[in-house]
Amino acid sequence: MSDSLVLATQQGPVLTLTLNRPAALNSFTEAMHQALRAALDAAAAAANADVRCVVLTGAGRGFCAGQDLADPMVAPAAPGEPPKDLALAINTLYKPLVQRLKSMPVPVIAAVNGVAAGAGANLALNCDFVLAGQSASFIQAFAKIGLVPDTGGTWLLPRIVGRARALGLAMLGDKLPAAEAERIGLIWKCVDDAALADETAKLAQRLAAMPAKALAATRAAIDGAQALTLDQALDMEAALQSQLGSAHDYLEGVAAFGAKRAPVFTDR
């Protein structure tokens, strides 16, 4: 396997990014952060209009085990030295990564194979869709080392599964099997391990054929509406429909509907 920390492969309009530290369950280092951000930035660039869906997955037997605690940025300081300020890693690595995912101009799918723990779990949950193999699991491991959920976990968990379950997952740090994660609405779908690749490919191709600009606006609207009143959300919807209504994909969608043909969406 390549020495690259993030592998990029493209099949038609679908770009797959694979975290590639399998011996360490793809745990994050500063270098892997930089590689992933660079790959996502490249996929988001206007020059890459041929990318219409991104799949994020992990090499080997795990999706991502979270932060590599031996990485120099977060490793505990030697006796007598000032303690590391973990806010540096949050502000320079994790916060920009979450913001990049939430601002992608195309849908992003997390294909979770094996363990997704700590920041790895919340990395997946920041994607638009999470598909997980039957043997996969999600662990909010932060409390086990005296920390709070990061990578957006404190914002995501109560909004996805409610306060009671969010506190249980975050405080107890128990392993949550993929099937149970689907049952409580934490992820989109749990599938047989052998079917994960095919199910992910089918979903990615379906999303790639849809109006990417409208899908990205839908993500932003649903996330943004959580902090709005109903009247404010209605105003936001009107503003977005005004923008999208003058775009190619709306006109193409209406024309295709009238002609009873499949639309060809191109906006991004």
Image (tube, rainbow, N blue to C red):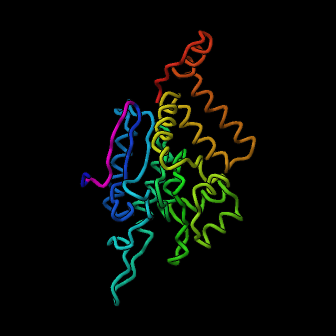
**For residue 96, which quarter of the picture?**
bottom left
Residue at 71 percent of width and 65 percent of height = 164
Residue at 38 percent of width and 80 percent of height = 76
**For residue 152, which quarter of the picture?**
bottom right
Residue 201 lies in the magenta stretch = no
Q: Residue furthest left?
A: 3
Q: Position of residue 226 (x, y in %)?
A: 67, 49
Q: How many marks?
A: 0
Image check: 215 left or right of 101? right
Dominant secondary structure of the residues highlighted in magenta in the image: strand
Query: Where 153 falls versus 261 (above or below)?
Result: below
Image check: 212 left or right of 232? left
Query: Where 34 falls versus 199 (above or below)?
Result: below
Q: Position of residue 51 (x, y in %)?
A: 40, 34
Residue 8 lies in the magenta stretch = yes
Q: Residue furthest bottom?
A: 80
Q: Residue furthest top?
A: 259
Image check: 176 left or right of 7? right
Residue in the foreground of this view, choosing between 10 and 113? 113
Give the residues in magenta: 4-12
Residue at 52 percent of width and 57 percent of height = 135
Residue in the foreground of this view, choosing between 234 and 48? 48
Q: Position of residue 81 (x, y in %)?
A: 34, 86
Residue in the foreground of this view, choosing between 213 and 28? 28
Q: Position of residue 266 (x, y in %)?
A: 46, 24
Residue in the foreground of this view, choosing between 140 and 71? 140
